[in-house]
């Protein structure tokens, strides 16, 4: 019966991966009915699995789901990915058979997290190189957001975070490095949402705390966690300066994100419903009404035949590939 349950869950997971990835690439959305159907299948499969195989791994699986929910919702709140991506992440977590997870749920969560963002980072760099080589895109790349000062500011912040965690949790910190890897990464992503690096007082305070903790308390900096955190910082800086795409104004659709330069062109227009500002992230996705207004603007006095939007990052594909690789590792290695 165990084989049947695992096969059932695996089959649903593969179907969800294929359908959601294709839908995200083609339409830019993940249909809710697909998530709901997958959720029903996941609950049925997992219920049958634990019914016939005992509850030995149930506690660990519950922690795995809880961590997955926290990670996905935090990334959604930080506007790293959309709501559909968060739902897909949780669904695929439910569809992983419990015996393919490592005994430490935090380690499993860290593995999936690292896989997803590694794939995303490679994709962003690869696509940018290809498009630049063919001169098919407009690209804004500035290292001002990743200056030596910024790197230093983040390093002392992460160091301060590490030493505080070591002081507070002590032995538990040393035994749960995967959990603190996730906390470090989420900490760095959260810092990206506040003007920390521009606040000299905050940077100086973190520097003093880091030096005192390391020198006088004998605490050590975990350079692996530091490296992973800086890699995520590099991803965020790179993604925030991502590719711009020029499209026909009449092709604008709900969910697209307009560039700052495009929104500025609406300033003198009398067309109602046009977006007034943009942060060039998921918070600035066009509504249906705004998209219709932009299309009407194309034929107005100040309208233009083309506008610039931000290329969509297909996070559903990265999430799917990350879980698929982890699933294969679970079957073959673990």
Image (spheres, grey):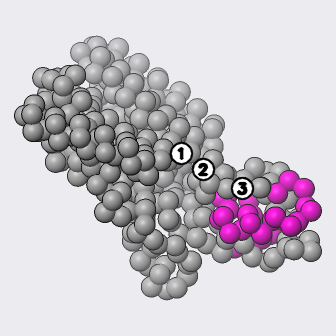
Q: Secondary structure at mark 1?
A: loop
Which residue occupies the foreground of this view, 297 or 16? 297
User: Rounded to the nearest whole Å, what is the CA distance between mark 3 and mark 1?
Assistant: 17 Å
Query: Would you identify the image quadrant in which residue 4 lies?
Result: top left
Residue on which disc 2 sits = 282
Q: Please give the name of the residue rendered at 12% of the width and 23% of the height, measured from the top-left corner.
A: 171
Which residue occupies the foreground of this view, 151 or 20? 151
> Looking at the picture, does residue 143 appear above or below residue 233?
below
Quarter of the image for the C terminus: give it.
Answer: top left
- Please provide percent x and percent y for residue 211: 17, 41
> Looking at the picture, does residue 112 appear above or below residue 253?
above
Query: Would you identify the image quadrant in which residue 53 lies?
Result: top left
Horizontal relation, residue 316 to residue 100: left or right: right
Q: Which residues are magenta?
A: 247-274
Q: Please give the name of the residue rendered at 16% of the width and 34% of the height, measured from the top-left corner.
A: 213
Which mark is in front, 2 or 3? 3
Residue on which disc 3 sits = 277
Q: Are marks 2 and 1 in contact (CB under 8 Å)?
A: yes
Q: Is residue 102 magenta?
A: no
Tell me if residue 288 can be seen.
yes
- Please provide percent x and percent y for residue 59: 29, 16
> Looking at the picture, does residue 131 appear above or below residue 64?
below
């Amino acid at each position: 019966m165990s084989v049947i349950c695992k096969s059932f869950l695996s089959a649903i997971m593969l179907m969800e991966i294929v359908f959601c990835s294709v839908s995200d690439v083609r339409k830019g959305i993940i249909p809710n009915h697909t998530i709901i159907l997958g959720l029903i299948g996941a609950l049925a499969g997992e219920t049958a699995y634990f019914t016939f195989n005992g509850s030995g791994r149930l506690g660990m699986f519950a922690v795995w789901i809880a961590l997955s929910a926290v990670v996905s919702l935090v990334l959604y709140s930080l506007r790293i990915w959309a709501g559909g991506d968060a739902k897909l992440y949780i669904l695929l977590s439910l569809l992983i058979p419990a015996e393919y997870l490592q005994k430490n749920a935090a380690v499993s969560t860290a593995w999936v997290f690292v896989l997803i963002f590694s794939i995303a980072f490679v994709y962003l760099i690869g696509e940018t190189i290809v498009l630049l080589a063919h001169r098919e895109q407009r690209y804004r790349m500035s290292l001002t957001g990743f200056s030596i000062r910024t790197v230093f500011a983040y390093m002392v912040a992460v160091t301060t975070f590490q030493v505080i965690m070591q002081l507070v949790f002590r032995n538990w910190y040393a035994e749960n490095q995967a959990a603190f890897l996730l906390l470090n990464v989420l900490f760095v992503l959260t810092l990206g949402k506040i003007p920390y690096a521009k606040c000299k007082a905050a940077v100086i305070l973190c520097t003093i705390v880091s030096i005192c903790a390391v020198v006088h308390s004998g605490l050590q900096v975990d350079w692996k966690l530091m490296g992973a955190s800086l890699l995520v910082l590099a991803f965020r800086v790179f993604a925030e300066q991502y590719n711009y795409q020029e499209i026909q104004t009449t092709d604008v659709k709900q969910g697209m994100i307009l560039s700052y330069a495009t929104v500025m062109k609406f300033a003198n227009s009398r067309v109602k419903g046009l977006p007034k500002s943009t942060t060039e992230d998921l918070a600035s996705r066009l509504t249906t009404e705004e998209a219709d207004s932009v299309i009407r603007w194309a034929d107005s006095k100040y309208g233009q035949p083309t506008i610039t939007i931000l290329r969509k990052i297909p996070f559903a594909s990265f999430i799917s590939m990350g879980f698929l690789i982890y699933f294969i590792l679970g079957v073959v290695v673990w």
